[in-house]
Amino acid sequence: MSSSPAPLFRAKCVAVGSALPEKRLTNDDLEKMVETNSDWILSRTGIRERRIAEPGTPLSDLATPAAQQCLERAGVDASELDGIIIATITGDYVMPTTANVVQHKLGAHKAFAFDMLNACNGFVAAISTGASFIESGRAKKVLVLGGDIMSSIIDYTDRNTCILFGDGCGAVLLEAGEPDGPGIIDFELHSDGGNADLLSVPSSGSACPASVEAIENHLIYLTQSGKQVFSHAVRRMCEVAGSMLERNNLNNDDIDLLVPHQANQRIIEPVARRLGLPMDKVVVNIDRVANTTDGTIPLAIADAFADGQIADGTRLMLVAFGGGFSWGACYLTWGR
Ligand code: UT7
């Protein structure tokens, strides 16, 4: 990805909102479902529990309250929004997009609305897209959400995957600001389709439409080669975060908080080490919410905001890696 011309505006990140299902699925609960044990899960992933929606819950049931909380904190009415972008791999329907559903529920009548599918890198891709609308002057207020109902595509008889994922959604409001003021300073996105088969959901797209056979063969569920994905994730997240620092002439002192995709505590730690950041400068909530795919970064921002770790002027590095493969990073200064 090459650098872009100087933007007309900068996209300020002015507020965050989040929503999680009530139900907790603990490691002890999983011990009763598959052949696993609580200590293995905690030591190999850092996960203690995850939130799981009731079967049939649409993503919009989480996205709408996350959006409403975000708008309320920002003091912005939904009617002022120019756009809504939702990063997800588990939208309400194949079509229409969940962003359309949320647009209607919010009453955001003048907002364009679409979903983005970029797996675990989806939120970084979506916030970069929202920022681009603002930087070019085409939109003044864009609501960017990331979330998934991962329980809808997880095989709860497969111990390799069912321990890893949870449900949740977060939202960040972007607003146009001065080009040299706070906001999204830079982002970088990458992809490598050559490794697509290492992490995928084989059925319900056009290549393998939903069918009785697809269900019987468990093709409607997420599958991954964990070890291989792990090593690509560490390498790519280190690379892209390092590149963001380098091309902006920054060093690790310029990062107040690293907000990484929460796939595995053992992925997060080497990324922090490579950037020379102590763990108290890294947002980690994987123990409580597990991997929510598109939800991890906005939920982590929401948690850090609630803990008082994020205020106006806090400099954040977002970094993610996921299926595709796709990976990316975003460097920003929080607040109005
Ligand atoms: O968000 C998108 C990107 N996704 C990721 O970044 C995920 C990347 N991968 C990972 O996080 C890790 O590879 C896993 C957590 C999925 C697995 O950890 P691992 O250290 O790579 O374990 P492994 O797959 O190599 O398995 C080690 C052992 C095996 O037993 P043997 O062959 O050594 O006897 C597995 O059968 O652990 C066994 N095992 C389990 N044991 C208890 C695998 N899953 C489980 C389980 N409970 N749930």
Image (cartoon, grey):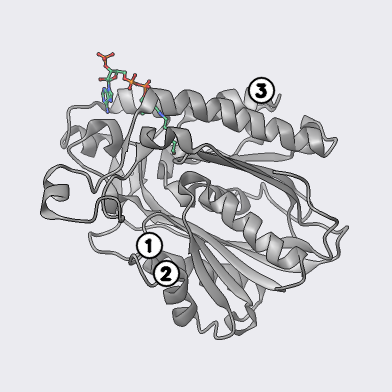
What is the three-letter code of the residue carrying label 1?
Answer: Gly
Which numbered circle lies on residue 97? 2
Q: Which residue is mark 1?
A: 91
Residue 166 badge: none
Residue 331 appears in the rendering: no
The nearer-to-camera label among 3 and 1 is 1
Residue at position x 21%, y 56% in the image: 210
Mark 3 or mark 1, earlier in chain: 1
Please give left or right for residue 178 compared with residue 31 in the image. right
How many numbered dots are placed on residues in this image? Answer: 3
> In the image, 243: left or right of 67?
right
Where is residue 257 drawn, in percent x and y? 68, 40
Relative side of 33 to 4, left or right: left
**Residue 273 occupies quadrant:** top right
Q: Is residue 275 above or below residue 245?
A: above
Quadrant into which the C terminus falls:
bottom right
> Quadrant for ligand 1?
top left
Residue 255 shows up from this direction: yes
Query: What residue is shown with label 3?
Result: 274
Look at the image and tell me in which quarter the N terminus lies: top right
Query: Which residue is found at the position 28% from the left and 30% from the top?
Result: 160
Q: Secondary structure at mark 2?
A: loop
Q: Residue at x 77, y 35 (%)?
A: 245
Which residue is at 30% across, 42% downward? 222
Q: Earlier in the sequence, mark 2 or mark 1?
A: 1
* Residue 322 position in % (x across, y down): 48, 40
Q: Position of residue 280 (x, y in %)?
A: 64, 32
The reply to whether the residue tagged 1 has its Cβ within 8 angstroms of ligand 1 is: no
- Mark 3 or mark 2, which has the lower sequence index? 2
Q: Residue furthest right?
A: 180
Look at the numbered discs 2 and 1 and tell me whether their residues touch, using CB distance below 8 Å: yes
